[in-house]
Amino acid sequence: MTPLDPVFGWSAQLFVAGVLAAAALHKLRDPVRFRETLRDYRLLGAPLVASAAALVVAAELVATGLLLHPSTRGWGVAIAATLL
C-alpha cells in the first residue's frame, strides 16, 4: 500500500483549522446570540452558559493554532474531534 502524499494531510489540517477559525470568529462577532443559542439547548444550567460559551470559542481558537504546527497536531486533532 502506497502512503498518501503529505499534501493531502496538510490540506485536511488547513481545512479543519479554517473551519474552526471561521466558527470562532462567527461566535465572537455576536457573543450574545451564541450564548442565547447555547442556552436554548438546555444542556447546562443558566449560570454555566456564559462560561461554556467562552470555553467553546477558546477551544476552537486553540485547536486552530495547534493544528497549524506539526509538533502539536495531535492535540489539535483531539480538540477538534471533541468539538465536532
Image (cartoon, helix red, strand yellow):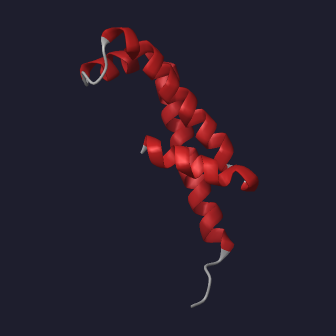
Is 81 placed above or below 55 here?
below
Visible residue check, residue 42: yes
Q: How many marks?
A: 0
Farthest bottom residue? 1
Q: Residue at x 47, y 25 (%)?
A: 27
The quadrant where residue 37 appears:
top left
Closest to the observer, 79 or 24: 79
Q: Residue at x 60, y 89 (%)?
A: 2
Q: Position of residue 61 (x, y in %)?
A: 60, 34
Q: Position of residue 52 (x, y in %)?
A: 44, 21
Q: Residue at x 53, y 41 (%)?
A: 20
Visible residue check, residue 30: no
Closest to the observer, 55 or 4: 55
Q: Position of residue 79 (x, y in %)?
A: 54, 43
Task: Pick the quarter of the image with the N terminus.
Answer: bottom right
Q: Is residue 51 left or right of residue 76?
A: left
Is 44 placed above or below 14 here?
above
Q: Residue at x 60, y 69 (%)?
A: 8
Q: Is residue 66 left or right of residue 45?
A: right
Q: Is residue 46 left or right of residue 59?
A: left
Task: Pick the quarter of the image with the C terminus.
Answer: top left
